[in-house]
Image (cartoon, helix red, strand yellow):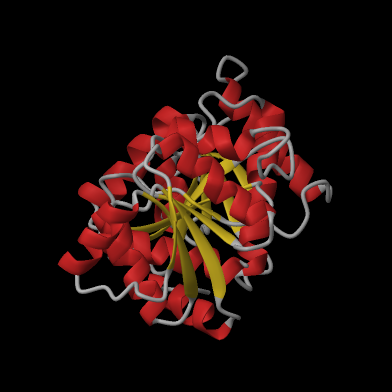
Amino acid sequence: MIKTLNELLEIAKSKQTRRIAVAAAADMPVLLAIKEAQNAGIVIPILVGDEDTIKNMAVEISYDISEVEIIHESNPAKAARIAVQQVRNGNAQILMKGLVSSGDYLKAILDKETGLRSGDTLSHLAFFESPYYHKLIAVTDAAMNVEPEFNDKVAMVKNAITAFHKLGIKEPKIAIVGAVETVNYKMTPSVDAALMTMMSKRGQLKGCIIDGPLALDNAVSKEAAEHKGIDSPVAGDVDLIVTPDIYSGNVLYKSLNFLGGAAAAAVVMGATVPVVLTSRSDSDYSKLMSIALAAAMD
C-alpha cells in the first residue's frame, strides 16, 4: 500500500538516476519541478527549447543549469520531436511535456516512424493523494481516450496494471465505474464493466481484482456498497477507478484537485518509456511528483 505521493519520491530515489528529456522546457513551473527533481537525485535533465528563455527563467528561480544539457529549438512542436528523438536514441529514459500543446506533444510520441509507441493504446493514469482516502487512488483516463471502445478500456486497464506492478503493488483493486452499479444493456459502460469483471475472474486480465459496474460511492466506500447490498472485494479499498470516458474522467480529476483538496501525479502509459503529461493548472508539486512517478516506474 502506498499512502502518499512522497512515497513515490522515495521509491524514485531508490532507483538509478535517469535522464529526462523535456520538450519545450521554457516553462517556469516545469523548470521548478525539474530543479527539485534534480536536487533530489532522481533525474538528470536534457532541456529542449529556447535557450535564452530557459537560461533567463533559471536565473529567476536560482536554478544553476551551467552543467545541464540544453538543445536550442524555439519552435515547441519541433522541440517535442527532438525530445522524443533523445529518448529513441537512448539519451533519455523519461519524456516530459513543457510549454507545448498536448496535440503537438502527443503527435511526436505517436508518430509511427519516429515516435515512442509500444502498443495500440496510450492512456493517461493519475494518482491522487486525498485527505479523505486512506491510500493513493488512481484514475484513468482523464486526458487521452475520448470515448473508448471495449478493447480500448481493456488496454487502459492493462497499462494501469503494468504501472501498479512496477510500483510494487502486485494485485491492484480496480473499479469500473458508471452511473449505476447494476448491468443495464442500454448503458454500454455497465455492460463493458461486467465483461471486464468476468475477464478478471476467468484469468483473462491477470494481476488484479476487478469489480464493476460500480457507482463511485460504492467504489470508495464499503459502507455505501453494503447499504446497497453489494458484496465487493474492491469497495472501500479501490486502487484504480476506470471512468467510462474522458468527460467523466476529466471532471473527476479536476474535482479531486480543486474541490477535494487532492494532490496528483500523472503519466501516460503505453509508450516505450514513462511519459510525463501534466495539466497547465497542475501545481509545481504535482509536476514534481509526476516526475517522481515516472522515475519510480522506470
Residue 209 position in % (x across, y down):
67, 56
Visible residue check, residue 18? yes
Please give the name of the residue rendered at 24% of the width and 56% of the height, measured from the top-left corner. 28
Is 217 or 254 nearer to us in this picture? 254
Is 250 or 290 nearer to us in this picture? 290
Please give the name of the residue rendered at 69% of the width and 56% of the height, measured from the top-left corner. 89
Farthest top residue in view: 186
Residue 166 position in % (x across, y down):
65, 67
Is 198 or 62 nearer to us in this picture? 62
Visible residue check, residue 230? no
Q: Quadrant of residue 221?
A: bottom left
87 lies left or right of 112: left
Count of residue discs:
0
Farthest bottom residue in view: 14
Residue 117 position in % (x across, y down):
69, 42
Quarter placement of the C terminus: bottom right
154 lies left or right of 177: right
Is 17 or 85 nearer to us in this picture? 85
Please give the name of the residue rendered at 67% of the width and 36% of the height, measured from the top-left corner. 121
Q: Quadrant of residue 17?
A: bottom right
68 lies left or right of 271: left
Please give the name of the residue rendered at 34% of the width and 54% of the height, measured from the top-left corner. 51
